[in-house]
């Protein structure tokens, strides 16, 4: 048993039991951030805030939502949207946040790729980030099932069909996942459980891991500079704040983060009040009908690039290409063979690789949205081939990159 003395204040009482001063020092006042970073490094905080908005709005929606195939649609579109005071507001916040969170995740991911923030001791930050991406994708998909509209039902049908594995015909697995032959009550119940309990818990744990993974290597910087955080923080603590290359996370850096968060929230609430419809598919305002297949089934915009990698090939090849697209980003720290943790602009062929990948994913996204008629089918096919080729080329071009 540790030695306890009579507390002089509530703070002292808590400090003796929980070591709150140490926690604050380690997590905030002596968590060092490089000075040479730009607004893109605020995206992590923007993501954390958006997740908070999803959590709070989700709790309010949960008070009236009914996970029942007979009443789910009306509980969302009638009870929450029309009867409950400000129900529409919570739904708009939840819907807009679910869409915008992916925009920010993609910006955050591509910032990491551009600056090489997945290298040299930062691999766990990257891997935990990619696990967060997978968890957010599962969270978005399971949430999309809940209003039990036409797109919920048919997207649920199409995605669960993928588990049959093409010519493997693992139909038993598909039925096991659905709990029925087609999406029905068991399906809605289990996706409801995943959406409101299991996946949010996993996300919270993964955010903890992601933040923990940042603590030792610290964040990267925009110049690819190898900063000696021990020496620079000593300089800062000795009073040479201007000469030191680092600042404290709290309150110094956080105040900068909060300015970006403030601007983001203006944009976010502008969408919530004036353009919430961009986050809602009109087809999903029709109740689910297992006898009426919509003419064109497509996922939300953030899944379109991987959907377009599945679509242009035959079933088996498409499934393999789709599986490849799901895991390949996770392997980035190991496929990039160059030791240079520098901005892409200073990295030879990698610079072209980066822009080619970004443009290719935008093309895939655009092609995923349109029906597979010509010339879109051909463009989508070549864009999917380009995606796979770029990943095969990555280890080769980075192996020969000059060490800077
Ligand atoms: C909700 C999900 C996420 C949250 C809350 C989050 C939060 C954060 C925060 C606060 C930082 C430090 C500041 C910054 O660089 O922005 C960070 C850094 C980082 N995150 Fe995330 N992140 C999330 C998802 C992801 C994803 C999907 C990836 C992609 C793999 C990722 C990869 C990284 C990387 C590589 C860094 C290090 C940046 C650097 O060292 O410069 N994160 N994240």
Image (cartoon, rainbow, N blue to C red):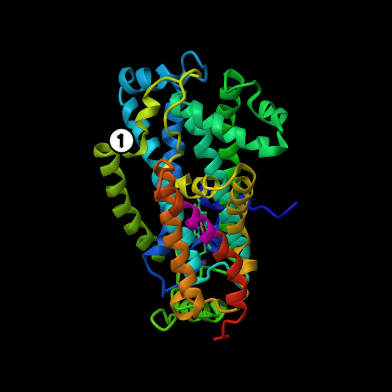
Q: Outermost residue, left direction?
A: 274
Q: Is residue 281 left or right of residue 70?
A: left
Q: In which quadrant will I find the C terminus?
A: bottom right
Q: Is residue 51 above or below residue 70?
A: below
Q: Main secondary structure of the magenta part?
A: helix
Number of labels in the image equals 1
The quadrant where residue 157 appears:
top right
Residue 383 lies within the magenta run: yes
Identified at 56% across, 79% down, the residue is: 340
Q: Is residue 192 left or right of residue 370?
A: right
Percent of width and height locating residue 151: 45, 29
User: Looking at the image, which is closer to me, 139 or 212?
Assistant: 139
- Mark 1 neighbour density, 10 Å: few (under 14) some (14–19) many (20 or more): some
Percent of width and height locating residue 83: 32, 17
Query: SS class of the residue under badge 1?
Result: helix
Q: Which residues are magenta?
A: 380-387
Percent of width and height locating residue 150: 44, 25
The answer to whether residue 33 shows anywhere in this view is: no
Q: Outermost residue, front direction?
A: 374
Residue 398 lies within the magenta run: no
Identified at 31% across, 48% down, the residue is: 265
Percent of width and height locating residue 349: 50, 77
User: Looking at the image, which is closer to me, 218 or 69?
Assistant: 69
Q: Is residue 193 above or below residue 346?
A: above
Q: Is residue 49 above or below residue 96?
A: below
Residue receiving disc 1: 277
């Amino acid at each position: 048993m540790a030695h306890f003395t009579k507390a002089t204040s509530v703070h002292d009482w808590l400090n003796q039991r929980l070591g709150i001063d140490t926690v604050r020092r380690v997590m905030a006042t002596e968590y060092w951030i490089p000075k040479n970073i730009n607004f893109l490094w605020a995206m992590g905080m923007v993501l954390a805030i958006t997740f908070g908005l999803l959590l709070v709005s989700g709790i309010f929606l949960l008070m009236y939502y009914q996970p029942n195939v007979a009443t789910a649609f009306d509980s969302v579109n009638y009870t929450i949207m029309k009867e409950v005071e400000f129900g529409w507001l919570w739904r708009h916040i939840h819907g807009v946040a679910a869409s915008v969170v992916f925009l920010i995740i993609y910006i955050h991911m591509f910032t990491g790729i551009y600056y090489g923030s997945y290298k040299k001791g930062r691999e766990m930050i990257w891997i935990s980030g990619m696990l967060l991406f997978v968890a957010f994708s599962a969270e978005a998909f399971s949430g999309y099932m809940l209003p039990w509209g036409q797109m919920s039902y048919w997207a649920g049908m199409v995605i669960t069909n993928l588990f049959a594995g093409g010519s493997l015909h693992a139909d038993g697995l598909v039925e096991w996942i659905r709990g029925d032959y087609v999406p029905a009550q068991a399906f809605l119940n289990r996706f409801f459980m995943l959406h409101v309990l299991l996946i949010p818990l996993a996300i919270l744990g993964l955010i903890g891991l992601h933040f923990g993974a940042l603590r030792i290597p610290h964040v990267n910087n925009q110049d690819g500079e190898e900063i000696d955080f021990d020496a620079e923080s000593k300089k800062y603590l000795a009073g040479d704040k201007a000469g030191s290359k680092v600042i404290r996370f709290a309150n110094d850096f956080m105040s900068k983060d909060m300015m970006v968060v403030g601007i983001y929230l203006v944009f976010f609430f502008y969408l919530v009040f004036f353009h919430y419809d961009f986050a809602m598919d009109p087809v999903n305002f029709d109740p689910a009908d297992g006898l009426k297949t919509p003419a064109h089934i497509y996922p939300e915009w953030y899944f379109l690039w991987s959907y377009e990698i599945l679509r242009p090939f035959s079933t088996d090849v498409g499934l393999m290409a789709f599986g490849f697209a799901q895991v390949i980003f996770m392997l980035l720290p190991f496929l990039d063979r160059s030791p240079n943790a520098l901005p892409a602009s200073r990295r030879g062929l990698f610079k072209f690789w980066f822009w080619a990948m970004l443009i290719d994913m935008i093309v895939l996204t655009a092609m995923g949205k349109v029906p597979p008629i010509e010339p879109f089918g051909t463009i989508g096919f070549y864009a999917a081939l380009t995606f796979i080729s770029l990943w095969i080329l990555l280890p080769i071009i980075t192996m020969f990159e000059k060490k800077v």
